[in-house]
């Protein structure tokens, strides 16, 4: 699943950028994700959402498989694949 990063070791800066492309602020609950509203990540990339029968797909690639998990620094949504950012 993670072949996009398996061809080389990432630098610290690349890892930080990769993680920021999976983080949004402020908090979004599962119910907040809408196909009508792409969301910018903290890495300044865009995420799009498709809702279908109670599920949410991100950038036509990753599905939210656990949602609204409380953590010490916000909400966590577990996904089943790497998110490939859209162009802003």
Image (tube, rainbow, N blue to C red):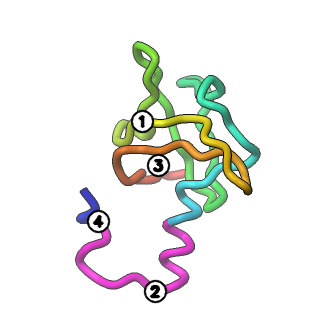
Find residue 65 and name its label: 1
Q: Secondary structure at mark 3?
A: loop
Distance from label 4 to label 1 (Cα)?
Answer: 21 Å
Which residue matches tag 4? 4
> Would you identify the image quadrant in which residue 43 lies?
bottom right
- Of mark 4 and mark 3, the one earlier in the sequence is 4
Identify the magenta region.
Answer: 4-18
| Furthest residue in direction top, as rendered | 53
Distance from label 1 to label 2 (Cα)?
Answer: 29 Å
- Which of discs 4 and 3 lies nearer the camera? The answer is 4
Q: What percent of the width, then of the height, locates residue 73?
A: 73, 56
Report the side of 24 relative to 1 (left or right).
right
Distance from label 2 to label 3 (Cα)?
Answer: 22 Å
The quarter in which the N terminus is drawn is bottom left
Which residue matches tag 2? 11
- Which of discs 4 and 1 lies nearer the camera? The answer is 1
- Which of discs 1 and 2 lies nearer the camera? The answer is 1
Q: Residue at x 29, y 65 (%)?
A: 4
């Amino acid at each position: 699943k993670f072949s996009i990063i398996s061809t080389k070791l990432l630098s610290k800066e690349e890892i930080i950028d990769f993680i920021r492309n999976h983080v949004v602020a402020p908090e979004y609950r599962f119910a907040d994700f809408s196909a009508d509203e792409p969301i910018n990540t903290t890495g300044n990339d865009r995420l799009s959402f498709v809702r279908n029968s109670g599920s949410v797909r991100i950038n036509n690639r990753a599905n939210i498989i656990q949602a609204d998990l409380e953590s010490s620094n916000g909400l966590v949504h577990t996904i089943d694949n790497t998110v490939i950012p859209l162009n802003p």
